[in-house]
Each structure stands twice: as structure tokens, then as C-alpha cells.
Amino acid sequence: MSIDELLERRAERGVPRGAARVWADSHGAEPSVESSGKRTSVTLFRLAVAVWILGFVAVGIFRSTSPQSNDAASGHSTQVSGDGSPDVVESDEPLPAPLLIDGGSLKRDRGGVSRPFDPDFDGDDLLDDLFPRSQTTPEVAELSPEQLTMVIFARPTEPFDGPIVGVELLDGGGFRPWGANVDDAALTDLTQQLERTNGEWSMAERSGLVEVARMEGDQFDSLRFGWQFDFQLGGNEEVTIQAETSRDDRVVDEWLWVARLAGQSQTNVAVRSIEVLGQDGIVIDRADGAGDSGVVWRSDGFVYRMTASTVEDNTAYGRDSTEDIDRLRIVERGEWLDAIAASSQTSIAQWGIGFAGLVIFVGSALSTVWFLVRRSFPPAALAGATVVAWVYLVASPIYWGTVALSAFGLGLAWLLHTRGRRATAGSTISG
Amino acid sequence: MGRERSPRGEGSNVVDEELFTALYPSLRRFAAVVADIDMDPDDLVQDALMRALQGVDLSDVSQPGAYLKRVMVNVVASRRRRKGILRRITPKLASETSSIDSYPSDLAVLEQLAPIDRAVVFLIDVEGMPSGEAAELLGLTALATRKRASRARRRLRTVVDEHPPAIVTNPEGRQ
């Protein structure tokens, strides 16, 4: 028998079942349904990928445009301790200036609390002091000598709307002038009109300016307690609000901030009057128009200052804070405490979502590498896109949306990889 | 060897079945040669068809017959590898008597060849396919195909000459 005959004989072995039977057996009871079902699954898969892409686009748009909501809850009022420390005990002393802003929520990374007598005191310590715990009393530092350190001259009426000259008295008898609402030439002219008689400073009558404020000792020593919080507004806008109150025997007012900012600025500042929460306030601006203005006002023994900024690429740029003063509101102490407490709390759900997001991110990165090793390029592209999208949208206000879409994308990538492996069963000879 | 794309929907399934029906005789013969002696050829055809339809529509494949034959060769090769692994793992359990001996010797001698070698020789010598076309069908180079065919023939010749296949006599006494 020849080889051909042998092979021919082999080819005819057995009893053929027939094409129809083999076809039916390969499809089970409903062969036509399986075929169309496979086609339907491909359409659904493509639709799922399209929805996934649109989802990420929507999250990205939401991230850049959607405002935050102010979730400050209404609370009950309590009072402060008798010594003025912000503890929860019965007292008649005024509360430390609860103030919130509509449409803004306290940022979790609070700007901190200024407490001149304790530089280690921060926002968490404030939180401890404000809730029912063991009472703490801030230590009072020794007073510095009550020497005159600052004299401010301005118009007797509407002083914030005219030329202002400040004289900072230095150790050794020298002085340093600063100006507000004046240019360098005018400041020089007004400085030349300063007079000093028996240690008292005055301005020549022809200047039209009179002494409107003076500070004795260290201006920071005047403060007893203060806080500063940052508020996140819609999009990338932020607001910072500070509140400072004085010791019983010292007074702090708007001039404190004028003196600070004017003295620190390289250029003369501009000051003008404005009304804030029904109180007289001032706007302090850099005269060169570089922005970074602040609104300062006094209320119930506290001096407030609000500044506004826009954050771009992790850099804060000052903007006109007068745009947001209509959103300020005095609240009950309970609501204020709730807002502070809420800003530092992390719910179990948030922890869970955060952990899930991290797992999905790592899983997507590893899957991308795996797909590349297996030469499964479309799933690698899908998983890689998930990684990139997660990195870009991780700071989205709806972080859960980012996590869900990332998980969805990773699932699609694995589904595509699995289907591709089955489909290539006959594409190469392996034996 | 192309085929026009069929319309989507239920109709394409009918086209696939018609296509398969036309290819069946060739596929069945090929399966009978490639499949191991203890494997039913129609089972191999069915297995290859099921695997192929999981990923593609036959009407979308330019050469569905060649595609299915390639799948069959892979399936048999994988099956042989699994049996070889199992035999190495459990040598004591393997029967000393090969299952080949239970089949007619004229068919069993082909078990000496690997499935792909049987496919090469069958396509070239029996089906009359040019070696280049056979190479393309099986996913091999032309040179590798010719070498496999030459080696397979030499091996078969050796086996046939040493152990000529027994002539099977049917009940009527005809050969």
C-alpha cells in the first residue's frame, strides 16, 4: 500500500455524522440565537466603551465647573468659659466670632489658627478647645513695655478714603514712614510735614491730616486670640477669613491691618471704605493693581480680614475679595462648630472609596503592563487610558465617579483581553 | 478565496451554516487524518467549529476552510501535549499496551507522525495542494513545509516497509 493510499484510507475512517448534525451539535439547541447573541455582545461592548469615555469627559467637565455646596449643619448655641478661652462652658463672654460664607465649605487642610501666645497652637488644637473636653486656658505672655511704636495720620472725617501716612517708630529713635492712598511723591511731601515736639508726633496743619490712631508696644502683642480658616468655593476659587480679638486692655481695629499691610508692602497700598455685614469696613489694595486685596472690618470686638484667591497649577493668585462679601454671614456657634468639625472628619465611606480608588489605580497600572507583555495591545491601551484618566481626575469633587469609571474601564480591558484570547485559538499553529 | 459579506442578523447565521455545509466533506477528511486514532473526526470538526464561532463569523473570514483546518491542528496538538504531560506525571498508570494496537494497523501507523506532519503530507500528496498553499494554510514557511513533508514521507516509508499494514478482510471476504 502506498503512502497516498494509506492517507486516503485514513481520511475515510469512521461514519460521518453529516454537516447538519455537526452544525447543530456545535450550536446546541438554539444555534441561530448564539450567533446573533455573539454579535449583540460586540455591539454592547462598543457601547460600553463609548459610555465609559463619555463618563470620564463628564467627570472632567464637572471637576472644572461645578461649585461646592456649603454643608454647614445647623447646631445649637453654647457659650464660652468665663475666662474668655474658647471652651464649652457657661459664660457671658462673647463667642469667638463664628463666621461662614455661603457656597463655601471649610477646607480640610485648614490654614491654621493664629494664637500669638502659643506658636505651636494649630487648627486641631482649636478644635479640641471648642468641644467639651478638659478646659485649657491660653497662657498670657508678658507684656512688652508700653512704648509708642506707630502713629497714623489721616483726614479727620472719612479717614480711609483720603491720604494716610503712618510713622513706624524704630529702636534708636529712627522712624520709617509708610503711605496709603498716596504715591511716592505725595508720601515724600507729607513726610516732610511731620513734626516732633517733646516726643510727640504731629503733622503740619497745611497737610489736612490729624492723628487718627496710635499703637503702643508690639502690635502683635495686642492680640489675644485669633483664627484663620480657608474656604473652598466653586471651581478653583478660595477665600481665607481671619479673625482677631484683643486683650481686655488693648484695642485692635482696622488700622492694625492697614499698618501691617502698608508696612509690609513694597509699594503704597490703597484703602477705601466699604460696608460688610452692616458694619463699616475697608478694602486694602496694593496700589499697583496687582490684586490680592483684602477686606477688613470690625465686629463685636473682633477684627476680621478676608482675602480671596484663585488657584491655578497649585499656585494661589489674589483676586478681588469684595466680590464675595455679600456671601458672608454670621452663624450660631453650633453651626460654626459643626462646620469646623465636619471639615476634619473623614467618613468610613470616604475611606473606603479612597482605598478602592488606590486599588483600582494600582490594578490598572499592573494590568497595562501585563497586557503589553501578553501583546494584547487594545486592552493595554484601555487600561492605560484608565490610569491616565484616574491621575487627571483624582482631585475631582465627585471622586466616587472617578473610581467607578476607572473600575468600569479596567473591567472592559480585561473583558476585551479574555475575548481576544479565545478568538485567536486558531490563528497560529502551536504543535 | 473570498466571500461576500452577508447581511447582519439572523441571515448571516444561515450563510455560515451553508458555508460550513459546503466545506464539511473536506473538513471531515482532513480531521480524520489529523485527529489521533482515538478521536472521532466529527468531534474534532465540531470542536474546531465551536472555537472558531466564539471569535468570528465564518462569512467574515477570507478562507474559512483553511481557518478551521488550522484550528483543528492546534486542538489536536494541544490534546497531545496534555496527554503527554499526564503520561509523564503518572507513568505507572499508563497502560503498557498502547491504545494504537486496538486499531487497524494500516491506520495506526500514521500515529507515528505528529498531527501537523500528517496534515502536510495529506494536503500535498492526497489533496494535491501546492506546498506553498499548504504552508499558508498551516501557518508555516514554504521551506518548513517541504521539509516536514519530506521527513514525514521518509518516516512513513520506513514504517510501512518494516510493518506493512495488514489487509483487512470484510465479512464478505473482500479486501
Image (cartoon, grey):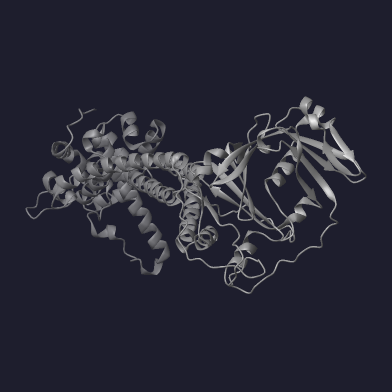
Of the pair A21 and B77, the residue shown nearer to us:
A21
Of the pair A364 and A206, the residue shown nearer to us:
A206
Question: Taking B25 as reference, is A250 left or right?
Answer: right
Please tell me whether residue A245 is drawn above or below residue A172 in the rendered image: below
Of the pair A318 and A48, the residue shown nearer to us:
A318
Please tell me whether residue A98 is drawn above or below residue A174 in the rendered image: below
Kindly give the residue lying farthest to the front in the view shown: A205
Of the pair B142 and B14, the residue shown nearer to us:
B14
Question: Taking A366 as reference, is A413 left or right?
Answer: left
Kindly give the residue lying farthest to the top in the view shown: A185
The quarter holding residue B156 reads top left
Give the image location of residue B21, x and y in percent. Answer: 14, 39
Give the image location of residue A129, x and y in percent. Answer: 62, 67
**Image quarter hosting the N terminus of chain B:** top left
Kindly give the residue lying farthest to the left in the view shown: B172
Q: Is residue A208 visible?
A: yes
Give the image location of residue A57, x and y in percent. Answer: 41, 39
Question: Taking B48 as reference, is A352 left or right?
Answer: right
Give the image location of residue A329, x and y in percent. Answer: 51, 51
Question: Taking A247 as reference, is A236 left or right?
Answer: left
Q: Is residue A309 visible?
A: no
